[in-house]
Amino acid sequence: MLVQDRAAAPSTLKPPKSQIRELPTHQQIRRFSEPKNLDFSSWFSENVSRIGVFFLFIVTVAALFFLYNTADTASLLCFQSQSTQSLQSLTRPQIKWNSIQVVSDKTSPYANFLTEKWIVVSVTKYPTEELKSLVKIRGWQVLAIGNSVTPKDWSLKGAIFLSLDAQAELGYRVLDHLPYDSFVRKSVGYLFAIQHGAKKIYDADDRGEVIDGDLGKHFDVELVGQDAKQEPILQYSHENPNRTVVNPYIHFGQRSVWPRGLPLENVGEINHEEYYTEVFGGKQFIQQGISNGLPDVDSVFYFTRKTTLEAFDIRFDEHSPKVALPQGVMVPVNSFNTLYHSPAFWGLMLPVSVSSMASDVLRGYWGQRLLWELGGYVAVYPPTAHRFDRIEAYPFAEEKDLHVNVGRLINFLLAWRSEKHSFFETIIDLSFAMAEEGFWTEQDVKFTASWLQDLIAVGYQQPRLMSLELDRPRASIGHGDRKEFVPRKLPSVHLGVEETGTVSTEIGNLIRWRKTFGNVVLVMFCNGPVERTALEWRLLYGRIFKTVVILSSQKNSDLYVEEAKIDHIYKHLPKIFDRYSSAEGFLFVEDDTILNYWNLLQADKTKIWTTDKVQRTTFSSICQLFFLICKSQKRNCYCD
């Protein structure tokens, strides 16, 4: 306001003095030579504006000082609470489950349509040939879910299509949380299918073709009744308590391929199972199918295993038996080729506050953990579909949450427990805890509450909780309980390159390296920026060593880079030794070194390694410090 008042001041006010001093005129000399009137009233009238500005300044300073020292001042609290606003606003939903009103379909042309088997897909383009083949599968109803980029005139004979307008008429609570341009709008389709009698939902992709056009040939569509296969299922062993996640592609013949959502630190675990156990079938409520052609792989694999203009055509062993996951061991689950049975329909919810490439993976891990509360489990099946690689870019940026957080998420889920006495309250409990830990935001907590209320509103019955096996002593695995199965070693096709014995040799080398270094921790110090190199270093060395610890002068929590000064690294190393107390040894390198680990296969791990020329037991100061610390900690250490 002062600026505006000055701009609007009358022209009689004196203009501001120039920064360039002028020569005095005769009148100016005469004026300054006259005696000045020192009367107080005259002085006050001449300086009233200056006094006002000074008084305003004093009042402003006093007000700020008062606000700063007043604990109950609302303005001050507002300033101080900005950093914790998101934490304070995170509230747990309170739901009256018995007061939820039924939602009936009164607007769609399918109001009276009921069937038990549904195929749900998200569509953004006109019907593909693969989608047309899905419509031909006998006994299954295809439901296509549109979004903001779907053609307005989308149509396919034999399929039910829900446009954005049709979805808005259904009255589901989840509609308030869903983005308009994302495949996560499939959540509307799941609710619609349940509302219209669904007992099985096949979560599919419009570029996936079911092999032989028969879902019942590959999946266990029936779990109870005369058509159910009452047979034991191979199960991964739970004997190793440190194993929390597996790569199922190894079981089906592809040891050098890994699924999207597998922590990168587990990519190097390529050995097949020494033995399996068995579990009785009937509770494999989530059934993950393997896809030939373009399996569900992450962008790291997609961009490093082929040229841009070539398409993947990877094949898995169709004769490998299905395999189940015990409680305590997880597997990536996607939304491309997965069969859900009604006891697991609650697990179809696709999170909305994470990236599209992370949504179904987080859903899969979240759902597996909750499935244990019902006594159910996930099973992985041999190739059930063929997905065609259309050579479309995989957005690496959208997978950042996966590569950074998925390992931490798995560990969190294994340790998490709930004291709630109903299953839906347990689901709310976990969703809230995941928001507190930063795996998703409060938006997904609210979305979970809306999703569960919608499930009840469309007629879904809440499952009953069962006791958790994780909290009970595990029975020892006797010799008679061990079941052997040795997967085939299929060539990992690199697009047009005909492989013969090369792959077997490479895999053999990898196994040999892993056997040598698999219990050695690699400690790497990065002198340069880590934003573009941390993941690459983990991918390069993570498959060989027990783990890769990356240090740098700049900490990066998102990439799990720890802060350390190269000159004071001796302060940081003992913490690493304590963290990996079971390791055989520790190898220290800097990022300006390329480690030829294959040349160290014959090295003696009971002695010191160094590439420096040792003259009178003198070598580089960093390595010397490293070895002194190792010696004091009674560790086997190596320095490159």
Image: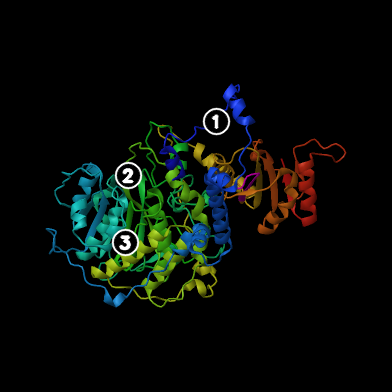
**Mark 3: which amino acid?**
Tyr
Which residue is at 50% across, 53% downward?
Answer: 405
Q: How far apart are labels 3 and 1 at the CA level?
A: 82 Å
Q: How far apart are labels 2 and 3 at the CA level?
A: 20 Å
- Where is residue 417 shown, x and y percent of the image? 49, 71
Is residue 89 visible in this depiction of the protein? Answer: yes
- Residue annotated with mark 2: 387
Q: Is residue 572 left or right of residue 318?
A: right
Residue 308, quarter of picture? top left
Q: Is residue 309 above or below residue 269?
A: above
Viewer-nearest residue: 556 or 479: 556
Q: Is residue 493 above or below residue 357?
A: above
- Residue annotated with mark 3: 340
Viewer-nearest residue: 23 or 546: 23
- Residue annotated with mark 1: 17
| Segment tinted magenta in the rendering | 547-555
Q: Provide the major secondary structure of the magenta segment.
A: strand
Of the image marks 3 and 1, the number of the one nearer the N terminus: 1
Label 3 packing within 10 angstroms: few (<14), some (14-19), many (20+): many
Viewer-nearest residue: 394 or 92: 92
Question: Per the image, is 90 magenta?
Answer: no
Q: Helix, strand, or loop for circle 1?
A: loop
Of the image marks 2 and 3, the number of the one nearer the N terminus: 3
